[in-house]
Image: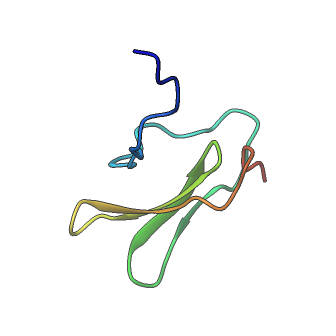
Amino acid sequence: MSDRSAPGCRLRLDWVYGYRGHQCRNNLYYTAGKEVVYFVAGVGVVYNTREHSQRFYLGHNDDIIR
């Protein structure tokens, strides 16, 4: 137990639950392909309603506030 280095693993985002509505306006969009686009904290989310799947955009290092 003398090794105090960080473990060699990474976290993976599987699903975003929730929606930021406080202090934000006009932050929910629909694409021409009927996908829902919104943001939660620093994550951009594209939700495909037909496949019940999400894609994530993780380039922000702080909350996205529009």
Residue 29 image offset from top left, x and y in percent: 56, 65
Q: Above or below — where is 22 with respect to 54? A: above
Query: In the depicted view, which residue is nearer to us: 2 or 45?
Result: 2
Image mark count: 0
The residue positioned 52% from the left and 23% from the top of the image is 4
Q: Above or below — where is 54 with respect to 5? A: below
Residue 31 image offset from top left, x and y in percent: 49, 78
Q: Above or below — where is 35 with respect to 18? A: below
| Residue 36 relative to residue 50: left or right | right
Q: Which residue lies furthest to the left in this view?
A: 51
| Residue 4 relative to residue 54: left or right | right
For the N terminus, give its image quadrant. Answer: top left
Q: Which quadrant would residue 49 be assigned to in this image? A: bottom left
Q: Residue furthest top?
A: 1
The residue positioned 77% from the left and 48% from the top of the image is 65
Query: In the depicted view, which residue is nearer to us: 9 or 27?
Result: 9
Residue 47 image offset from top left, x and y in percent: 39, 62
Q: Which quadrant would residue 50 be assigned to in this image? A: bottom left
| Residue 60 relative to residue 4: left or right | right
